Amino acid sequence: MSSQSQHANPNKNRTPRHRAREFALQGLYQWLINQEDAGAIDAHIRNAHGFEKADAEHFDILLHGTIRDAAALREVIVPLIDRSIDQLSPIEHAALMIGAFELKHHIEIPYKVVINEAVELTKSFGGIDGHKYVNGVLDKLAAKLREPEVTAGR
């Protein structure tokens, strides 16, 4: 296998936790579009192809925690965005909510990892420059929610 073809499939090396974030993003997308019940979304996604390779526990925490805390997460996101939250694409909205949730509730995950993961989700599922927007917003949010960690990292 040539070195070029080894890099042809970047998704080959996705970690179980990254896969959990991908499935959570898909679930949040459904929730944002259809306001479907979290339990129904959860059941549907657990039957999706490839779910067995995901970190099911992290998926559970992200999907249910983000939906449960949606109002509080939006409260911290809204002051940092340049448009109404309803004008965000559902992918950007979902990625920002997952990022905000992890920044707020999972301090064991370094803030740079949280931001990078949200950016990668937006690159995979979103529009052309959505990842740049998500990166900028979460960078500002990390500076607010994790000031000591961000300051130490600079």
Image (cartoon, rainbow, N blue to C red):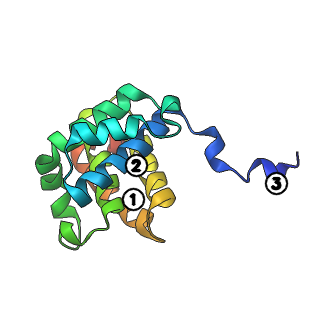
Farthest top residue in view: 57
Q: Residues within 10 Å of mark 3 (few under 14, many from 20)?
A: few
Residue drawn 30% across the image and 53% down it: 30
Using residue 90 as the reference point, say whether residue 76 is left or right of it: left
Mark 1 and mark 2: span between their CA atoms?
A: 6 Å
Amino acid type of disc 1? Asn
Q: Quadrant of the N terminus?
A: top right
Using residue 99 as the reference point, say whether residue 4 is left or right of it: right
Tag 1 residue? 135
Q: Nearer the viewer, residue 137 or 32?
A: 32
Q: Position of residue 7 (x, y in %)?
A: 74, 51
Judge whether residue 128 can be spotted in this image.
yes
Mark 1 and mark 3: span between their CA atoms?
A: 28 Å
Secondary element under disc 2, as helix, strand or loop, is helix
Q: Residues within 10 Å of mark 2 (few under 14, many from 20)?
A: many
Tag 2 residue? 115
Q: Position of residue 114 (x, y in %)?
A: 39, 43
Q: Is residue 111 above or below residue 97?
A: above
Using residue 96 as the reference point, say whether residue 79 is left or right of it: left
Question: Cβ–Cβ below 8 Å for labels 1 and 2?
Answer: yes
Q: Nearer the viewer, residue 68 or 147?
A: 68
Tag 3 residue? 4
Mark 2 and mark 3: span between their CA atoms?
A: 28 Å
- The tag earlier along the polypeptide, 1 or 3, is 3
Residue drawn 17% across the image and 49% down it: 73
Disc sitting over residue 116 in the figure: none
Q: Position of residue 81 (x, y in %)?
A: 23, 67
- The tag earlier along the polypeptide, 1 or 2, is 2
